[in-house]
Amino acid sequence: MNPEYSRERLAAFLSAVLQRNVKIVRILPNDSTRISDETSLLITDIIVELEDGSLANVEVQKIGYAFPGERCACYSSDMLLRQYKRVRSASGDEFAYNQIRNVYLIVLYEKSPKEFKKFPKEYFHYSRQIFDTGLQLNLLQEYIMIPLDIFRLNMDNKSIETPLEAWLTFFSDDRPEKIIELITKYPDFKAMYETLYQMCQNVEKVMGMFSEELRILDRNTVKYMVEEQQQEIDALHAKLEQRDTMIEQQNTQIKQRDAQIKQQNAQIEQLNNIILTLNQRLEVIEQKFKSLQIECPSQIKDKPF
């Protein structure tokens, strides 16, 4: 994807994402401070100027950073401000705000942040600023977020049908059957797989790339993300302990209820025995009464009990 050597590949990808024909005019330098801060989790970070003057920043993140919305807003604003300073400096007194063009921040996540997991069927998120009244103003900043892990799940048992799906498959899926399907439907990708193969043959060069990637760490963000995960683990342990306590309390209540039921059953059995005894006595009385009726019917008739 390096636009210095294969500009047409990045242009083809941007055309698929932006859904219009894109031509790259030049590559712009990255913010060195940003790169030194974030290299640990970034796979790719490329800024290019397009034919219409707009800027596109393409990022591929190995693991999605925390606070993805706030982070994207900051870097989009930074890109817009850098363009403003450059255009204003070049235009001098002739500067007008309509010389500023759109900036596109396109982020692909190999492992997407938790916010994206709430939308398991969506792998292409587009955003731009609009007014709720319908007022039409070009506020210049547009965002596209693509969680590749969610894309791959959605492509299970589904064929590749669009150029965008082809590119995202190339980025996210290394299953042989998918690679065959991809290069059969879109032969241009065959050359890219050959490039990857040649890169992998040079193990020393690839390892050097990874060593350089690992040399500079995004300490603050990575530390925060580790601490956040630890907090989640601690919270989970607390919930488990709370659940164990509740289960123990419930077991105690169940035992108490079982004891009460056992006591009530004993009382019921005792009452049943009393009732049985009374029924037996009643039967004896009824038998005696019947025998008296048989022996002295006239007396019984004249003298009521």
Image (cartoon, grey):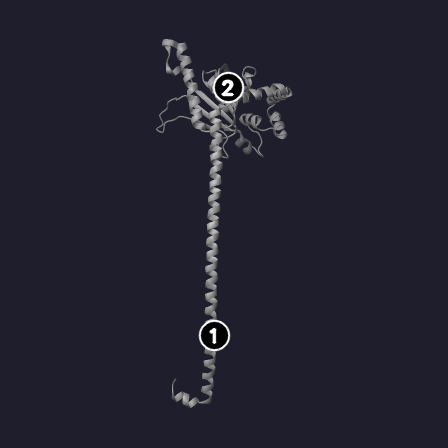
Q: Residue at x 46, y 57 (%)?
A: 257
Label 1 neighbourhood size at 10 Å, few (<14), some (14-19), many (20+)? few
Q: Is residue 203 left or right of residue 126?
A: right
| Residue type (three-letter) at the residue carrying disc 1 | Thr
Q: Residue at x 46, y 54 (%)?
A: 253
Asked whether residue 31 is in view, the answer is no
What residue is disc 1 on? 277
Q: Nearer the viewer, mark 2 or mark 1?
A: 1
Q: Quadrant of the C terminus?
A: bottom left
Q: Which mark, by number, is residue 14?
A: none
Rendering coords of residue 304 (x, y %): 38, 85
Label 2 neighbourhood size at 10 Å, few (<14), some (14-19), many (20+)? some
Q: Quadrant of the N terminus?
A: top right
* Quadrant in the rendering for residue 292: bottom left
* Quadrant in the rendering for residue 293: bottom left
Q: Nearer the N terminus, badge 2 or badge 1? A: 2
| Residue type (three-letter) at the residue carrying disc 2 | Ile
What residue is disc 2 on? 46
Q: Is residue 91 left or right of residue 158?
A: left
Q: Residue at x 47, y 80 (%)?
A: 284
